[in-house]
Image (tube, rainbow, N blue to C red):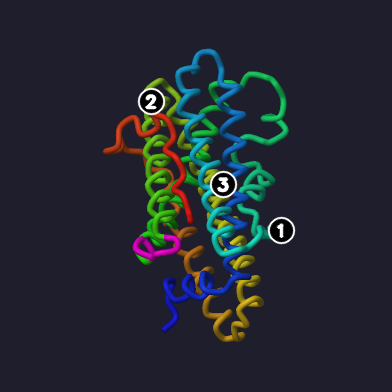
Amino acid sequence: MLSAKSVFQEILANDESFALFCSIAASGESQGGWENARIAALVPESERELAPKITRHGADEDKHGRIFNALMKKRGLDPVPVPPETDYTMLLEKNGIGLAHEQLGRDERLTVQDIVTYLSHSRVTEQRASEQMELLRKHFADDPDIGRAVRQISHDEDNHLAYCHEELLRFAHAGHGRAIQRTLRACALAEIRIHRDVSLGVMAHMGRILGWSRAKSAVLAAGIHALYAYERLGGWRRMVSLRMPERRDPLGGPASAAPEFA
């Protein structure tokens, strides 16, 4: 039976597809780590109290990149080049979502509006990350090879999402509500399209590696298009709502250490 679990099991069981999966994930996490580190360094003076949380966010992303690299090393695998059409983080940046890398590369203080843009972008992408890790945790939390990694990363992504809710609500109460909703909507509508395109790219590469039949590839592609249709018709709204999270001040402490892999 074709299911999300069976597809993931097939990808994880093959060294070449596993290396590609981990390389794509590690690259995205590392890019997120760099972005957060630069944002923390450039926070406006009026929001300096937010800098440690942004730093913690970036440290978590860097940790996730190390975890994916460690999973490859454990199997004696090296990272592989990430195909451009599967580079989710860079495609978001190229489509004007979030803060441009050119801006982050300059030593100029960000504005409060820049921080609102960053948090809105993060709220949307962390929703996606949290949901994807929840799916992996559902099926692989007890897996002897990747279980610890899945549980750790899933916990962190839930914290990141809670942090975005908390901080955006703070900015909304300070008078930025309309800008937040406008930015969230634009980010969400762009993200669902980029997620669709990246998913199709990843599945195409996995299909070639694993020798999937045309029929199987077509079914998986249809599923990706169906998810996009649902999200375009209204599913995107889950990415723009704001509510006070149960986890308060989730990024208020130091980042936890990455688990060791023998």
Say the numbered circle drawn on residue 29.
3
In reply to whether residue 141 is colored magenta, the answer given is yes
If the image is split into quadrants, where does the N terminus sit?
A: bottom left
In the image, residue 79 sits, relative to residue 39, either above or below, namely: below
Say which mark, if any, is on residue 170.
2
Question: SS at mark 1?
Answer: loop
Amino acid type indicated by mark 2: Arg
Q: Few, some or many C-alpha atoms within 10 Å of disc 2 (few <14, some 14-19, many ≥20)?
A: some
Foreground mark, 1 or 2, reads: 1
Please tell me whether the stretch drawn in magenta is mainly helix, strand or loop.
loop
Quadrant in the picture for residue 205: bottom right
Q: Can you tell which mark lies on residue 45? A: none
Give the amino acid at mark 1: Pro
Mark 1 surroundings: few (<14), some (14-19) or many (≥20) residues within 10 A: few
Instruction: Work out whether residue 6 or residue 215 is closer to the camera in this orientation and state it.
Output: 6
Q: Residue at x 54, y 33 (%)?
A: 118
Write down the quadrant of residue 157 in the picture.
Answer: top left
Q: In this view, does 176 lie above or below 152?
A: above
The answer to whether the residues at label 3 and label 1 have Cβ atoms under 8 Å apart is no
Q: Position of residue 124 (x, y in %)?
A: 48, 45
Q: What stretch is highlighted in magenta?
A: 140-146
**Residue 122 in the image: x percent, y percent?**
50, 40
Looking at the image, is mark 3 or mark 2 nearer the viewer? 3
Cα–Cα span, label 1 and label 2: 40 Å
For disc 1, the marked residue is: 81
Q: Which amino acid does label 3 sit on?
A: Glu
Crowding at label 3, few (<14), some or many (≥20) Cα neighbours within 10 Å?
many
